[in-house]
Image: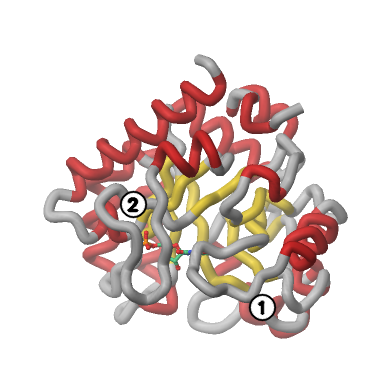
Amino acid sequence: VDRTKLTYEKREKLANNPIAKKLFNIMATKKSNLCLSVDLTSTSKILDLLTRVGEHICLVKTHVDIIEDFSESFVTQLKQLADRFGFLILEDRKFADIGNTVSLQYSKGLYKIGDWADCVTVHSLPGEGVLKAISASVNGVSKGVFLLAEMSSEGNLITPDYIEQTVKVAAKYPELMTGFVCQNKKTFSDPGLIQLTPGVQLQSSGDGLGQVYNTPEKIILENGADIAVVGRGIVAAKNPEAQVVIYRDALWKAYAERVGA
Ligand code: 5BU
């Protein structure tokens, strides 16, 4: 069966990872398959933007290591917004070291990512130790992983064999796997996993630094995305509140068409 023809409600039942279940449920309930990538360097700007657009997104994606004034209070406020608006938090850390180092990077240091992020991104490059290092739960709270099978950037070195091996290793960690970061429908088939696809913008086809953009319609209808990641298309817009609604509607319409709803 083609996973992309199933509704998010059906797929919620097929998911093993609790974060994947929650995400499918949030998407169906909020009618939003939009992940906002808040690539801003000030905590007040991030919190302010999320206060204005939080009701329209299912997931927020952070890069905490670009923030200039990171603090524990920021994390508390971010989690409050996530609760208030009903979205989850993905830290796009792209862990890519040996298991022992990743385990330290996940739980220690300035950011203590494992304490607050519902899910994180991970490279398969180092081998499965990197997955063993991320716990499926921290202090009794479920966590998840989006494993990178493909990237959106021009000239990236990922090969078809790398993609195949990545999907194979993920199958050994059903409790932990929320989904894949990838660009193509054929990359994986498990309907209980989520396809998260970055490189989405309406205004432009690239950024001059290797990013490649596709439209919401293309990534949902042709490329099999379940959740679209939009950063600058919304964050750098003159009116982010208006843009977030435009992206959310376009993405949801494409999903509804895809599942024939
Ligand atoms: P943009 O402003 O919409 O281009 O931001 C895209 C975000 O997604 C940005 O935070 C990237 O780090 C992230 N990203 C990506 O663009 N492409 C990828 O393949 C992966 C992550 Br993985």
Callout 1: SS = loop
Badge 1: residue crowd in 10 Å (few <14, some 14–19, many ≥20): some
Q: Quadrant of residue 235?
A: bottom left
Residue drawn at the location 83% of the way across and 52% of the way down: 171
244 to the left or right of 73 = left
Q: Residue furthest left?
A: 238
In front of the other: label 1 or label 2? 2
Label 2 Cα crowd, 10 Å radius (few <14 / some 14-19 / many 20+): many
Residue 79 seen from this side = no
Q: Amino acid at mark 1?
A: Ala
Q: Nearer the viewer, residue 125 or 19?
A: 125
Find residue 204 and report its image quarter: bottom left
| x and y, in percent, of residue 160 in the image | 74, 62
Horizontal and vertical percent position of residue 4:
63, 32
Tags 1 and 2 touching, CB below 8 Å: no
Amino acid type, callout 2: Gln
Q: Is mark 2 within 8 Å of ligand 1?
A: yes
Q: At 58% from the left edge and 40% from the top edge, which residue is drawn? A: 224
Alpha-carbon span between mark 1 and mark 2: 27 Å
Mark 2 — residue? 201
Residue at horizontal 74%, vertical 56%?
136
Left or right position of 171 against 238: right
The quarter of the image holding the N terminus is top right
Q: Is residue 49 visible?
A: yes
Relative vertical location of residue 13 with respect to residue 183 in this rendering, above or below: above
Quadrant for ligand 1?
bottom left
Residue 96's disc number: 1
